[in-house]
Image (cartoon, rainbow, N blue to C red):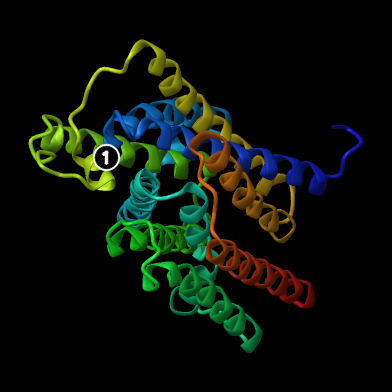
Amino acid sequence: MGHLTRNQIGILMICLGTGLITLNDMMFKALSGDYALYQIVFARSLGGLMFSLIILQIEGGWRLLRTATPWQHAARAMMVVVANMSFFLAIAAMPLGLVSALFFVAPLLITILSIPVLGEQVGIHRWAAVGVGFAGVAVMFVPELLGQGLGVPGWSYALPLVAALSYAGNQVMTRKLGVTSRASALAIYIQVMFLVVSIVSYGVLGQGQYAQGITNESLVFLLRTWVWPAPGDIWVFLALGLNVAAIAYCLSQAYRMAEAGVVAPFEYVALPLAVFWGWSVFGEIPGPFTWAGMVLIAGAGLYIVWRERKSRKRD
């Protein structure tokens, strides 16, 4: 890669990292029919924690974990947990492409949250883009209104939106906390929170006593008993742990090597990849309203990224 510029390396890393994220989502969906959500999250987070601890030692050691704002870090980590849990519960019952598209309202929500939290100014162009993005969300609900939906409860559609809102809150807090904390420390706080939530969930739900009589796939995924993985699935669990470590490395490298405004648009590679995995593995084919909503949401998000980059250049 010696002949590539830093921005080009960043673009390659963000595309690889984004591709691995959709692979992660596909593996979660594949396991969701047999294992509990908290069990899969526990296995994945162990791998992520080990990787983050190695990076922490490279960056400066245990002293980097000291912070004057532990509760803010805990709140940020919990937002990541909520975002992930909501997203994975959604893909257990809904097509992967649809859930991914709804989740990509996150950049629009980041724009809104940046006003009260960071004191940023948002102009008419970005407000218009936010409106277009939410129009895309509305378009995706049309089949439900026409009685041609997925046959899932209405709250299932809210899950990826809850994930997007939690992710947006996490991103806004990261902008504040990242000034004084290293990326490895931020990652460790998150993985530890995942492990804590998974262990507590096992203590409360591990016997599957609350799953009796439940038919909704998202709720079954949440409430199912903890079981030892089948021999063939152990490799998938191991792959999840390695995959989350690789994702963390690729994303951190992308934003370390290149300008954020350069690499951020390439995160939308996730949308066609999610559709590909949904079609090739699960036989899911998006309908016309899903495609239309996806285009509106992605277009609005890309426009916001472009406007922010243009504003920074002016400054």
Q: Judge by depth and name the residue closer to the eye, 287 or 60.
A: 287
Quarter holding the N terminus is top right
Rendered residue at 44%/79% (across/down): 116
Residue beneath disc 1: 221
Q: Judge by depth and name the residue closer to the eye, 171 or 287.
A: 287
x, y (%) of residue 77? 36, 49
Rendered residue at 13%/33% (across/down): 208
Relative side of 313 to 42, left or right: right
Q: Residue furthest right?
A: 3
Relative side of 106 to 219, left or right: right
Rendered residue at 41%/37% (across/down): 29
User: Which image quadrant for residue 286?
Assistant: bottom right
Relative side of 221 to 68, left or right: left
x, y (%) of residue 62? 43, 32
Which amino acid is tagged 1?
Answer: Phe
Labels in figure, total: 1
Residue 157 visible within the image: yes
x, y (%) of residue 207? 11, 29
Residue 315's place in the image compared with 155, above or below, is below
Quarter holding the C terminus is bottom right
Rendered residue at 53%/29% (across/down): 243
User: Which image quadrant for residue 237?
Assistant: top left
**Local crowd size for mark 1, using a 10 Å CA cut-off: few (<14), some (14–19), many (≥20):** many
x, y (%) of residue 235? 45, 16
Q: Residue furthest top?
A: 231
Residue 122 visible within the image: no
